[in-house]
Each structure stands twice: as structure tokens, then as C-alpha cells.
Image (spheres, rainbow, N blue to C red):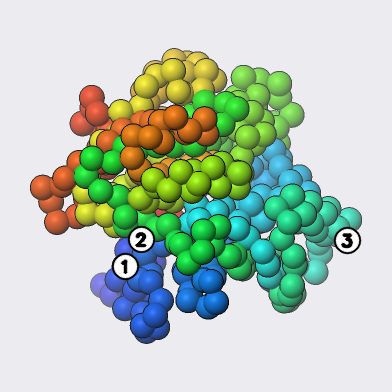
Amino acid sequence: MSKRYETVSDYGERSIISKFIKSMESVSEALPLDDDCQFLKIGDGAIISTDRTPSNLRYFEFGFMNYREYGRYHVYSNISDVISSGGVPKYYLLNLALQKSLSISDLEEFLVGVDEELSKFKVALVGGDTKEGSELNAVGIVIAEPYKRNTYINRSGAKAGDFLFIQRKEYGLGLTPASQEIFKMHSHRKTDLKLEESFEACLVRRDVSTMGPCLEAMKSILDQEIISACADNSDGVYATCAEIAKASRLDLMIDLESNFIDEYVHEYSSRHSLNAKLLALGAGGDFRLVLTGSEELKSNKHLICIGRAVSSGQVEGQAKVVGTSETPSVWNHFKTC
């Protein structure tokens, strides 16, 4: 019988970071490798982050994003991390792997999208690298300055008694997790779904139209100076809350009111006999801010209160959904189907 070797799929993204990568921490003046960003004490402080946008992004694969929209997504998915850390993005490095067969028109459209989104946030492209690859892969590096001098917001500052908030947008919560469910159900006919004028296709388009971070929302929150922890919703609301709870060593009790869930998500849940609350909190990120802070933040027009922080009886904090013992789906690279 041949020996079975462990693979990355046996661990998943978070276990790889905690078991292998965190052991490589070596810069004493840097913060622990628990967040998507790093704060460095250079001048008034610098916030840096990096992220990769693969060509198998489901919205792109299914045709709900063209090359231009894919380029925009690449930028705002990178910039979102530094904004949620209290940074104002200033500089960007773009690293590309391009397959030989990629048409120049598609490359130009991708770069138009990149340029549009960088211009929107007033970020300067200052360098990067371009290499040959088997498929289109884009890696961005963002350098930001703190909105408040020498101030960095991470996931570990939440305190018992804090309120839990999520950013308010034009549409309600849950569109991105619902889109991910739709993609799984239609994986055998990607082109057909895009061409349809079905309810499912309309839901995904609605989702795409509201994606991305809002710098002005974060600035207004920081101006109130009553925020304790923050992260962007890049993996799902429940997963993001769980990360804050774990880092802060307390429990976050999520009590999401039904009226904050998007009407399309309610309809999709009804059609497929799903729990709308669990779906809305599940796997899939729309880059909203998820944060903890004092009760005064309830007056901020950009925020919705969805819970409280309480002391944990465990060594590690957890996120819990009020009113159910069930757990929403969680995205975990290498392990999630």
C-alpha cells in the first residue's frame, strides 16, 4: 500500500497560515501576522497589503465580469484590506502573469479597469512586474498612509460590551453568498446562466453592481474615534466575525435582523428552502466593513448594528448566530468546494 502524503487541501488556508507562516515572524517592530495588512513604523506609519486575483474568479468565469470589470475587481479587492485597517491607499504595484494566447484587446480592457479603479481612489501605479504564465494572474501590492497619524485598526481590539456593525450599502446583505450558491448549482452550464434573464442571473448582476470598498465610509467611522476592531468582508460575514472574535479572544453574538437581508436573498432562500439568515452570513465577500465599537456608532449612516461582543468562556473567541445552533458556510481556500 503506497504512503499517502499530506497536501495543502488537508489543512486549508487558515491552518497553513497559523501552522507554517506565522512561525516565520521575524521583524520585531512589525505586528503579528494575523491580519491581511501590516503596519510599519516608517515616518507617520505605513500600511501595506497584497492579494492575488486568479483567472478562475467565478464572476469572471461565468461571464458576469468582463476583462475591464475583472481589472476593477483586482484593484478594489486589494485596496479593501488597507481601507479596513484605517489606511488611505497611495501607491500600487501591479504584478502580472500572462499567457501567450491572451489577446491584446483583452489585456487592454483589463488595464483600463485597473486604471479606472486606481484613479477612483487617487492611487498612483509606481511599478510591478510582467511575466509569462499558463493563465492570467494578477497580484497587487498596496501602500497606504494612516488616515489618523500612526493609527492602525486590526482585528484584535474588540472588547466585551462593544457593538458589532457591518457597512450599509445600496442593497441588503447576502447577495454574494447567494451568488456563490448559484454558481455551484450551475457549474455545468456557465454560459447559459449569463445569457439568461432569469431571477438567478439578475441576483448575480445585482451583487456585482454593489461590490467594492468605500473609503469615505471608513473615514467617517474613524472621525468618531470609537472603533475598536475592523476587517473587510472578503470571505463572508460569519467568517469575518469569527476572525475578529478569535483575534480579540471574545465571542461575537450575531443577531441579524431579517429586514437587513436583501429581498433577492429572501426570495432565493424561499425558492430553495434555505435559511435566509444563515445564507446571508455565509461564504462570499462583498468587501463591506465589519467592525466593533461603542454604541455611538449606531448613529453613523454607513453602519448597521448586527450584534454584541461578550466575554468568552473559551481560550479562543468564537462567532455565534443568535437563535440557531447551525453555522453558516465558511469559505476556506484549498478545502472549500
User: Residue 201 at what x, y percent from top left?
Assistant: 65, 27
Instruction: Tell me the amino acid under the disc marked 2.
Output: Arg
Disc 1 marks a residue whose amino acid type is: Ser
> Does 43 sit above or below residue 86?
below
**Residue 276: image x %, image y %?**
40, 23
Question: In this orientation, which residue lies closer to the viewer: 205 or 315?
Answer: 315
Q: Nearer the viewer, mark 2 or mark 3?
A: 2
Q: Which numbered disc, 1 or 3, marks the residue that appears first in the sequence?
A: 1
Which residue carries the number 3 mark?
A: 104
- SS for callout 2: helix
Across the whole image, how many numbered discs are drawn on residues? Answer: 3
Instruction: Label 1: state its secondary structure.
Output: helix
> Would residue 308 be found to the left or right of residue 329 on screen?
left
Q: Residues within 10 Å of mark 2 (few under 14, many from 20)?
A: some
Secondary structure of the residue carrying tag 3 is helix
How far, Cα to Cα, is label 2 from label 3?
37 Å
User: Between 277 and 186, which is closer to the camera in this rendering?
Assistant: 277
Q: Say which residue label 1 marks.
A: 18
